[in-house]
């Protein structure tokens, strides 16, 4: 448990240092005509909500994959379709997956 807490503290410190460094770089590049307080608040909120959306979509992706929502809703077997031709005949029934 102590190792997890130490890891979180170290990663948070690295993130804070990267944020401070990027703030310093952006401030020095603007040549004295920096953003107003409202500009920094807007940029911070934009970054926050972009990350929130990204984290939420990744969480939904993992949830969907782990609970079987990504599985095909129908199992197709085109081997009996005579009009499809030999190139289109593929086995979509997942036969033989037990061997993997």
Image (cartoon, rainbow, N blue to C red):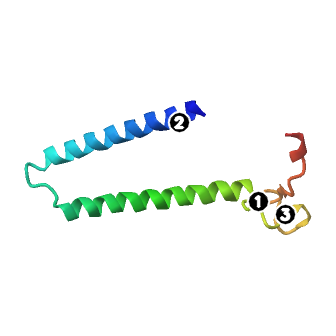
Alpha carbon distance from label 1 to label 2:
37 Å
Residue depicted at x 89% and y 61% = 79
Alpha carbon distance from label 1 to label 3:
10 Å
Q: State yes or no: discs 1 and 3 in contact (Cβ < 8 Å).
A: no
Where does label 1 land, which residue? 71
Question: In the orientation shown, which residue stands out farthest toward the top?
Answer: 3
Question: In the orientation shown, which residue stands out farthest toward the left?
Answer: 32
Where in the figure is residue 72, as x and y percent of width and height? 77, 62
Where in the figure is residue 99, as x and y percent of width and height? 89, 40
Count up the numbered dots. Answer: 3
Alpha carbon distance from label 2 to label 3:
46 Å
Residue depicted at x 86% and y 46% = 97
Q: Nearer the viewer, residue 67 or 91?
A: 67
Q: Nearer the viewer, residue 73 or 18?
A: 18
Q: Which mark is residue 5?
A: 2
In the rendered structure, the answer to whether residue 42 lies left or right of residue 59 reads left
Where in the figure is residue 68, as x and y percent of width and height? 76, 58
Q: Quadrant of residue 65?
A: bottom right
Q: Nearer the viewer, residue 25 or 93?
A: 25
Nearest to the eye among marks 1 and 2: give it. 2
Residue depicted at x 88% and y 67% = 81
Question: In the orientation shown, which residue stands out farthest toward the right?
Answer: 80
Q: Secondary structure at mark 1?
A: loop
First in residue order: circle 1 vs circle 2: 2
Nearest to the eye among marks 2 and 3: give it. 2
Q: Quadrant of residue 37?
A: bottom left
Where does label 3 land, which residue? 75
Q: State yes or no: discs 1 and 2 in contact (Cβ < 8 Å).
A: no
Q: Secondary structure at mark 2?
A: helix
Q: Quadrant of the C terminus?
A: top right
């Amino acid at each position: 448990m102590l190792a997890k807490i130490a890891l979180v503290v170290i990663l948070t410190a690295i993130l804070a240092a990267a944020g401070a460094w990027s703030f310093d770089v952006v401030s020095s590049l603007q040549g004295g005509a920096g953003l107003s307080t409202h500009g920094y608040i807007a940029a911070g909120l934009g970054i926050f909500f972009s990350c929130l959306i990204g984290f939420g979509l990744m969480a939904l992706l993992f949830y969907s994959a782990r609970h079987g929502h990504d599985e095909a809703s129908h199992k197709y077997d085109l081997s009996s379709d005579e009009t499809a031709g030999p190139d289109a005949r593929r086995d979509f029934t997942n036969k033989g997956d037990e061997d993997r």
